[in-house]
């Protein structure tokens, strides 16, 4: 009430008044991580590596070990996923889980966050609240993008951490071998897992930027998720068509395979670097489209 | 309308930058013009290539394969993404064949060689002492870089070059045909073209030899009637520099299935390996060559262990020396683990002649006939030449 | 609260002004040539039937929508060009409240308060509590928004407009969904703001509401301003009428019509336009026509009649729209924007 008394004596503000970005970010993050479905999906992402690890562990110990050559049960051309051989190690399980989940579930998580960030807010009419405060649209986009980035980072970290812990429990800390047959120290493994998280976050942010661009153009958050899902599926199909290999470098999921290079020793950085660069390109495209759409859209 | 203009500029420039970046990844180095290098004739080039000690380097090689290999289980040995090669400039080398979700690692140093397959978590070790060394060098070539092999055979490079060229000259034209940029390095293109009299399906074979180090960087095989190479094996990255000694040591991971063999038992081990596959005898032991030069046909009683390897081997003998370790690694890993008879029925076409009857399998650069009584003839030649070779036997 | 605050700016200053404002949505003209003036310190009621362009005008005023043509000045600065300089001083409730159902009322407000430039970090909690208190939601602050009644939701929206000290408060249909007590509450708040010298712009379809709270009125119809000015002037400008109480209204209307006097049926008889005639003539005419006149009295024109007449005339002119019954609620406003049934005249975005 006392604040109200000062109302009219206040001079017109000298110039641009802004709420501190830090405060906006805190508010945004609190909102993201209070949202029930965010929590449900993050929980699911945490549980999946555990399930994978336990399932593989049971299969490997229960059934006959499929180690010794010969025509395996997996039929011609069916290369078993890396899981089968070393899956339960605290090194391979987190990376394997990350790679598998990066195909669909993690991008969809990020798409969901991006969909809620603009389209969802708009559909609730809540975006207006910030626009009227006012939060300039450029800054709004920055805050929203950081929110999506944090979701990507947290999701990737949860997957890796959960896989790592499961691996430690199932296989202990001393069975940390790379695909090249070298043993790695716990420190090296942790270093590589951090690189994997960073890389996955960048990849997811590329998806997130495109999702934000879609999110800025619609009021239906589900449409964002569906579009991203469709894009991933179409890309996946196109990547299978070798006649279109000229197109493949333009497709984001092309980078996914390079994450496996982190299990090689020494790490082959070429593919990871190219993947990171490709993600960066998508990020630039997505964010500039989102900016263009958000600044011209009616609030 | 100002915000709209601003938005359009932002969107336009963002998309331009992003797409430009993507295009960069799509068009790797190689779009540059061919480098200008001092002229050199073929003999000098081959001599210098043989003289040069390979430097310490690391590189990434890739294979592009348009051979039209039938979809047989053995053929997926060529289904790898890339091969990483590390060489210390002397005895030691490390070759990693990267497949989408697994890796084959070959490590060779002064007194042992390792082969590790991550898919099966199994390691094979080969050890030798000084006495075994010479023999080991001959035989371990299958899992180690081939350079050692070539060195051993060609004591005097100049002499060897002359010999090779003399050997090839009756059947081939050998020229240095311009330059190329391979793995972002300047290289000479050595081109071998069959003489018109040769009855081969091959058009030419080119070898790109690095101008600085004289290391062969790329090996391309062209077939008649095709502008793109049917088989291309070459470095996409190649960097000269000292390598970490740790790369050439190998300790199998705990839990790996390790088999150790002494060099003296190599021959026996090979027998076992072949035995596993249910085929009598080892490869290369019962092969004879009919004809020479480009239309040479390999005839033997062993079913082709890997069709790609046989075809490559059917080229001029000298080209074998240029093949990087990667090529032999890729080919050598193809285990003959298939039911050949059933397979041939699927992919082959029946053929008969004086020799009896069998199946003919054709690929882009040649073909093979497997007779019903287990003989096989293969070469980079038309079907009739294979039949003739079998008939001669 | 007790001391009337000094009104900022010189007398006769204008809090909001538009010139030739026009907005076209995909070929549909929503607002056309609107010249609006909101005097500082005034409580301006914006009246108009559904689809008359009220909300679109407000959204353009607040910089949410880019006008197709025209200029806007808000508290002395051009909008949307310099909107970020002036919007901190403007509180607004537009198109119903927009909140997240899984957060409590308080958390929702805190989220918006975080974006208020005029509030420092330490003031946030206090400002939210004060705003909740002010709209009578202090007791339900910790309840999830999803559990709020329509009236509570509306109050929370009002609270969000009052989070920071304001110079101008824009309320789009603030009493929508409120019970009579809530409506009283809103009136009280508007009166309070007015007492503090805050300019208030209220859009409403409830004429009684506007008549009770506003000092100025703007009437919009079909995207065009049909009248604006101080409430008193507007009431005076209405033609004087005579209410004739009679049992036979139809006969009375017919008789007057024969004598070219304008009259409408009223519940108790007829209401007669006194333009160009006098009460004596009217009564004489009726008596001669054999209509029994029970009672006749001059009436001050209610805002309702002004509104009805203005929009009625225009509606007849355009051949499609007759005056909306003012008491009829706008059902669309009760729903979240996303689920709004396609409005025929006033596109939402």
Image (cartoon, rainbow, N blue to C red):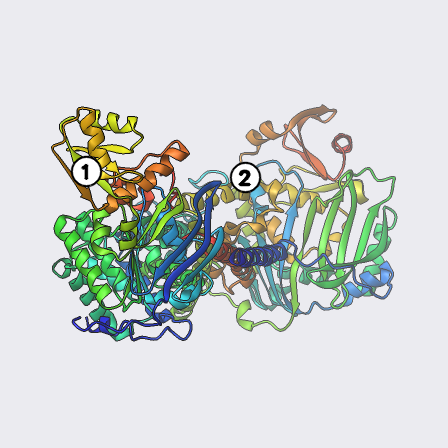
- Percent position (x, y) of residue B260? 49, 59
Pointer 1 local density, CA inside 10 Å: few below 14, some 14–19, many at least 20: many
- Percent position (x, y) of residue A139? 42, 64
Q: Is residue B353 above or below residue B183?
A: above
- The residue positioned 56% from the left and 72% from the top of the image is B244
Residue holding disc 2:
B73
- Whether residue B352 is visible: yes
Chain ID at mark 1: C
Q: Is residue B378 above or below residue B246?
A: above
Query: Is C336 positioned to the left or the right of C298 in the image?
Result: right
Residue holding disc 1:
C243
Quadrant showing the C terminus of chain B: top right
Pointer 2 local density, CA inside 10 Å: few below 14, some 14–19, many at least 20: some
User: Which quarter of the picture shows residue C313?
Assistant: top left
| Disc 2 to disc 1, C-alpha distance | 102 Å
- Percent position (x, y) of residue A246? 63, 47
Along the line of sight, the residue nearer the viewer: A108 or A72 = A108
- The residue positioned 63% from the left and 27% from the top of the image is B372
């Amino acid at each position: 009430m006392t604040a109200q008394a000062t109302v009219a004596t206040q001079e017109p503000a000298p110039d641009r008044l802004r709420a501190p970005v830090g405060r906006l970010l805190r508010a945004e993050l609190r909102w993201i991580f209070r949202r029930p479905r965010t929590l449900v999906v993050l929980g699911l992402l945490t549980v999946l590596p555990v399930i994978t690890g336990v399932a593989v562990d049971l299969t490997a110990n229960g059934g006959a070990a499929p180690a010794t050559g010969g025509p395996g049960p997996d039929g011609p051309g069916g290369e078993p996923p890396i899981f089968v051989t070393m899956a339960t190690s605290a090194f391979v399980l987190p990376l394997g889980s990350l790679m598998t989940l990066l195909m669909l579930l993690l991008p969809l998580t990020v798409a969901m966050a991006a969909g809620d960030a603009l389209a969802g807010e708009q559909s609730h009419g809540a975006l207006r609240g910030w626009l009227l405060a006012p939060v300039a649209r450029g800054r709004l986009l920055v805050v929203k993008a950081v929110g999506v980035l944090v979701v990507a980072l947290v999701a990737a970290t949860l997957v890796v951490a959960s896989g790592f812990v499961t691996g430690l429990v199932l296989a202990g800390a001393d069975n940390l071998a790379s695909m090249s047959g070298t043993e790695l120290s716990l420190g090296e493994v942790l270093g590589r897992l951090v690189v994997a998280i960073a890389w996955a976050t960048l990849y997811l942010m590329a998806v997130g930027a495109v999702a934000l661009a879609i999110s800025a153009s619609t009021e239906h958050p589900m449409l964002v998720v569906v579009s991203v899902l469709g894009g991933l599926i179409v890309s996946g199909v196109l990547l299978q068509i070798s006649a279109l290999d000229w197109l493949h470098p333009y497709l984001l999921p092309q980078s996914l395979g390079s994450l496996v290079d982190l299990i090689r020793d020494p790490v082959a950085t070429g593919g990871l670097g190219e993947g990171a660069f490709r993600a960066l390109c998508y990020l630039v495209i997505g964010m500039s489209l989102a900016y263009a759409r958000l600044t011209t859209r009616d609030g | 309308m100002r915000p709209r203009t601003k938005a359009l500029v932002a969107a336009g420039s963002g998309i331009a930058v992003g797409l430009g970046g993507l295009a960069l990844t799509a068009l790797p180095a190689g779009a540059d013009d061919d480098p200008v290098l001092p002229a050199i004739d073929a003999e000098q080039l081959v001599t210098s290539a043989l003289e040069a000690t390979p430097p310490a380097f690391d590189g990434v090689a890739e294979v592009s394969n348009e051979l039209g290999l039938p979809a047989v289980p053995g053929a997926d040995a060529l289904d790898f993404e890339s091969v990483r090669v590390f060489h210390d400039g002397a005895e030691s080398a490390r070759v990693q064949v990267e497949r989408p979700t697994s890796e084959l690692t070959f490590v060779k140093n002064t007194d042992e060689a390792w082969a590790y397959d991550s898919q099966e978590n199994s390691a094979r070790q080969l050890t030798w002492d000084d006495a075994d060394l010479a023999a080991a060098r001959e035989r371990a070539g299958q899992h180690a870089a081939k350079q050692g092999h070539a060195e051993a055979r060609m004591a005097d490079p100049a002499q060897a070059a002359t010999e090779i060229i003399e050997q090839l000259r009756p059947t081939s034209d050998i020229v240095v045909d311009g330059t190329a940029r391979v793995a972002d390095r300047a290289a000479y293109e050595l081109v071998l073209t069959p003489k018109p009299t040769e009855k081969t399906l091959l058009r030419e074979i080119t070898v790109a030899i690095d101008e600085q180090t004289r290391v062969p960087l790329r090996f391309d095989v062209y077939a008649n009637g095709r502008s793109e190479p049917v088989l291309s094996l070459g470095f996409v990255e190649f960097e000269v520099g000292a390598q970490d000694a740790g790369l050439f040591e190998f300790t199998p991971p705990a839990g790996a299935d390790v088999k150790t063999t002494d060099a003296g038992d190599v021959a026996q081990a090979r027998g076992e390996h072949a035995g596993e596959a249910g085929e009598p005898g080892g490869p290369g032991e019962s092969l004879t060559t009919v004809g020479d030069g480009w239309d040479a046909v390999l005839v033997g009683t062993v079913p082709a262990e890997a069709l790609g390897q046989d075809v490559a081997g059917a080229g001029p003998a000298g080209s074998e020396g240029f093949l990087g370790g990667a090529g032999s690694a890729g080919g050598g890993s193809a285990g003959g683990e298939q039911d050949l008879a059933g397979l041939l029925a699927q992919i082959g076409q029946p053929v008969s002649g004086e020799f009896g009857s069998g199946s003919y399998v054709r690929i882009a650069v040649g073909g093979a006939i497997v007779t019903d009584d287990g003989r096989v003839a293969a070469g980079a030649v038309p079907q009739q030449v294979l039949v003739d070779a079998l008939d001669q036997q | 609260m007790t001391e009337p605050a000094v009104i900022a700016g010189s007398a006769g200053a204008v809090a909001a002004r538009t010139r030739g404002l026009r907005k076209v949505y995909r070929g549909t003209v929503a607002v056309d040539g609107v010249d609006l003036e909101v005097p500082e310190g005034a409580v301006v009621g914006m009246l108009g039937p559904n689809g008359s362009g009220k909300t679109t005008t407000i959204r353009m005023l607040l910089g949410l929508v880019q006008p197709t043509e025209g200029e806007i000045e808000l508290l002395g600065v051009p909008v949307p060009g310099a909107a970020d300089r002036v919007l901190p001083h403007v509180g607004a409730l537009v198109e119903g409240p927009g909140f997240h159902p899984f957060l409590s009322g308080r958390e929702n407000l805190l989220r918006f308060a975080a974006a208020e430039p005029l509030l420092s970090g330490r003031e946030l909690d206090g400002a939210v509590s004060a705003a909740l208190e002010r709209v009578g939601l202090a007791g339900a602050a910790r309840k999830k928004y999803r559990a709020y009644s329509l009236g509570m939701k509306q109050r929370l929206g009002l609270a969000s407009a009052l989070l920071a000290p304001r110079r101008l408060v824009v309320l789009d249909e603030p009493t929508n969904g409120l019970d009579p007590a809530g409506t009283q509450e809103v009136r009280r708040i508007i009166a309070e703001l007015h007492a503090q010298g805050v300019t208030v712009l209220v859009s409403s379809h409830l004429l009684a509401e506007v008549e009770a709270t506003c000092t100025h009125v703007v009437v919009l119809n079909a995207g065009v301003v049909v009248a604006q000015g101080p409430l008193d002037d507007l009431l005076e400008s209405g033609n004087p009428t005579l209410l004739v109480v009679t049992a036979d209204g139809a006969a009375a209307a017919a008789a007057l019509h024969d004598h070219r006097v304008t009259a409408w049926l009223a519940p108790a008889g007829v209401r007669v336009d006194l333009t160009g005639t006098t009460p004596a003539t009217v009564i004489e005419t009726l008596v001669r026509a054999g209509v029994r006149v029970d009672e006749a009295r001059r009436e001050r024109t209610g805002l309702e009649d002004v509104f009805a007449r203005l929009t009625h005339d225009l509606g007849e002119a355009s051949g499609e729209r007759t005056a909306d019954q003012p008491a009829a609620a706008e059902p669309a406003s009760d729903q979240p924007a996303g689920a709004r049934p396609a409005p025929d005249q006033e596109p939402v975005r």
